[in-house]
Amino acid sequence: MTKIELVEMLAHVPLSTHKEPQHIFLVSDQVENYLEQFSKYQFLEFDIEVSLIEDFDGRIAEFENGVFDIAIIDQKLNNIQIAHISRVLKKDGLVAMVGESFETLKNLAKNFRIAMPYLVFMKDNFSEILYFGSKFYHPTADINLQRSDLLEDLNYYNSDIHVSAFYMPNYIKNEIANFVRN
């Protein structure tokens, strides 16, 4: 999986799930790639405002409770950082993030009504796992098909990939059955 494919999946899954994604909290060193993806939503009737955070630990305390609709994090977070993400999200907020193990998913499940892995890519000793956490929206039940199908010039993401990214093989389903919430 290339960096741009990863960026597309972290950006478009939450933006095509949330009803009105207006305020985004972004923690990444790939800022230009994300801004390019966000610009594809110019057809929306509302503007998307992005708060860029480079030093997560130093800046998270600055934000009030419930100010963001979406958090997109392409860095690994610990349990305390995940709790802060939940705190700064609105009551219908959601997060898309990367993780190294299912411990991240367990931490998400403590802070979000819905916590699910998606796009689990495992090959040899390498794995890339994306996680979706939501206080309200379900990533496959609440996908805005019209919005996702209007996106143009994408390398990887489309509405079919969006839904299929949440399908897991049985060995993963069995491993996460005790703590995943979907």
Image (cartoon, grey):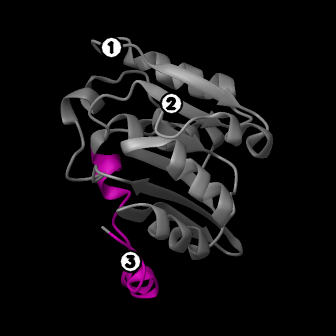
Q: Nearer the viewer, residue 99 or 56?
A: 56
Q: Tag 1: residue type?
A: Phe
Q: Which mark is residue 169?
A: 3
Q: Is residue 103 toward the left or the right of residue 39 in the image?
A: right
Q: Is residue 125 toward the left or the right of residue 58 in the image?
A: left
Q: Residues within 10 Å of mark 2 (few under 14, many from 20)?
A: many
User: Which residue in the structure is indicated by mark 2?
Assistant: 24
Q: Relative to 53, is 106 above or below?
A: below
Q: Residue at x 60, y 51 (%)?
A: 84
- State which mark lies toward you, 3 or 2: 2
Q: Tag 2: residue type?
A: Ile
Q: Nearer the viewer, residue 13 or 182?
A: 182
Q: Residue 112: x, y in percent?
A: 42, 60
Q: Nearer the viewer, residue 105 or 3?
A: 105
Pick out the residue farthest to the front. 64
In magenta stretch: residue 22: no
Q: CA distance from mark 3 to mark 2?
A: 31 Å
* Residue range highlighted in magenta: 160-181
Q: Relative to 44, is 22 above or below?
A: below
